[in-house]
């Protein structure tokens, strides 16, 4: 019997929701602009209610997922054409100014360079013709060309309250508190490297920022090893007044997932098998 309503969560990579007709073009975009390659392909339906499905794994556990369905799925959906999410998936690169110039030359939509958490330079860029936002971060210690994983940035209104919320409801630990600089670094374990940690940065949103629920196209996913614990965890979140989706996927047997929202409308995703 599972006694802890908040099970151990492990960061398991990222799912990117891609339109069905754009799947091949999206693969080519990432190959061209980020030097990523195909690691695995599946004609897999993320939910039995889909009529068709496709899933492609690119570098660093990044899965592109597309499906055709005649109904709204409980978990596998993204809202397009609305406000931008306050969840940023960051990728470190050695020479960010050179990458910024190259993206500009290639016609990629991108932001100006700016300073962010960790006192380093960033820029946001919008991938594929769907405008899927990622964030580049400079790290001159990176040895290889291209992009390697960094932390996940989440915009919140109140740093101290949010840090406690993530500790209480996701089991995150505070690694460094830089509240005086507008951010707190927290951590979870890594699913496939249990001796290492994934870093999540809670950063202070500017006054007036939108904090309603947003289901963007980029979903950092946390893994729960015990399948039954996922259902118990969802019940605990709902009993605690936290909005959670229905469980999507193959509920009786196979991959299952659901998402919920933090107090600032940031979507958080969990899966199990």
Image (spheres, helix red, strand yellow):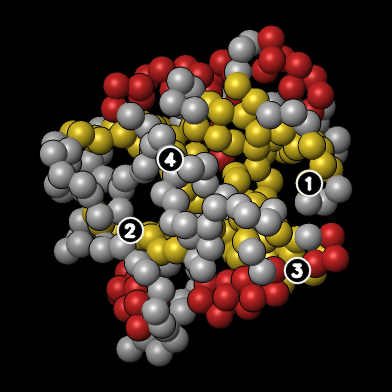
Q: Secondary structure at mark 3?
A: strand
Q: Nearer the viewer, mark 1 or mark 4?
A: 4
Q: Separation of disc 3 and disc 2 at Cα?
A: 28 Å
Label 2 crowd bin: few (<14), some (14–19), many (20+), radius 10 Å: many
Q: x and y percent of residue 76 in the render?
A: 31, 47
Q: Separation of disc 4 and disc 2 at Cα?
A: 23 Å
Q: Is residue 166 above or below residue 95?
A: below
Q: Is residue 154 visible?
A: yes
Residue hosting label 1: 116
Residue hosting label 2: 257
Q: Nearer the viewer, mark 1 or mark 3?
A: 1
**Which numbered disc, 1 or 3, marks the residue that appears first in the sequence?**
1
Residue hosting label 3: 175
Q: Nearer the viewer, mark 4 or mark 2?
A: 4
Q: Nearer the viewer, mark 4 or mark 3?
A: 4
Residue hosting label 4: 82
Q: Are dots 3 and 2 in contact, CB under 8 Å?
A: no
Of residue 66 and residue 242, the one placed in the foreground of this image is 242
Q: Separation of disc 1 and disc 4 at Cα?
A: 24 Å
Label 1 crowd bin: few (<14), some (14–19), many (20+), radius 10 Å: some
**Which numbered disc, 4 or 2, marks the residue that appears first in the sequence?**
4
Q: Residue 36 lies in what quarter of the image? A: top right
Of residue 55 and residue 119, the one placed in the foreground of this image is 119
**Which numbered disc, 1 or 2, marks the residue that appears first in the sequence?**
1
Q: x and y percent of residue 57 in the render?
A: 44, 35
């Amino acid at each position: 019997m599972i006694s802890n309503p908040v099970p151990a969560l492990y960061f398991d990579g990222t799912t990117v929701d891609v339109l069905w007709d754009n799947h091949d073009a999206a693969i080519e975009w990432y190959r061209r602009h980020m030097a990523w390659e195909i690691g695995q392909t599946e004609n897999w339906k993320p939910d039995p209610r889909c009529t068709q499905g496709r899933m492609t794994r690119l570098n660093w556990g990044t899965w592109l997922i597309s499906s055709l369905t005649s109904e709204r799925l409980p978990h596998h959906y993204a809202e397009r054409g609305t406000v931008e999410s306050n969840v940023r998936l960051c990728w470190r690169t050695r020479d960010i100014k050179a990458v910024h110039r190259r993206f500009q030359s290639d016609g990629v939509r991108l932001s100006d360079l700016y300073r962010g958490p960790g006192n380093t330079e960033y820029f946001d860029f919008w991938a594929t013709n769907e405008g899927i936002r990622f964030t580049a971060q400079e790290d001159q210690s990176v040895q290889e060309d291209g992009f390697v994983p960094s932390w996940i940035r989440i915009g919140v209104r109140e740093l101290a309250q949010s840090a406690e919320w993530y500790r209480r409801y996701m089991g995150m630990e505070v690694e460094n508190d830089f509240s005086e600089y507008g951010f707190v670094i927290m951590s979870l374990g890594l699913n496939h490297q249990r001796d290492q940690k994934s870093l999540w940065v809670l950063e202070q949103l500017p006054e007036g920022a939108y904090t309603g629920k947003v289901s963007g196209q980029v979903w950092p996913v946390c893994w729960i090893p015990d399948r039954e614990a996922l259902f118990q965890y969802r019940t605990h979140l709902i009993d605690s007044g936290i909005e959670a989706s229905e469980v999507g996927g193959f509920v009786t047997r196979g991959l299952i997932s659901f998402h919920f929202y933090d107090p600032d409308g940031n979507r958080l995703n969990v899966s199990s098998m």
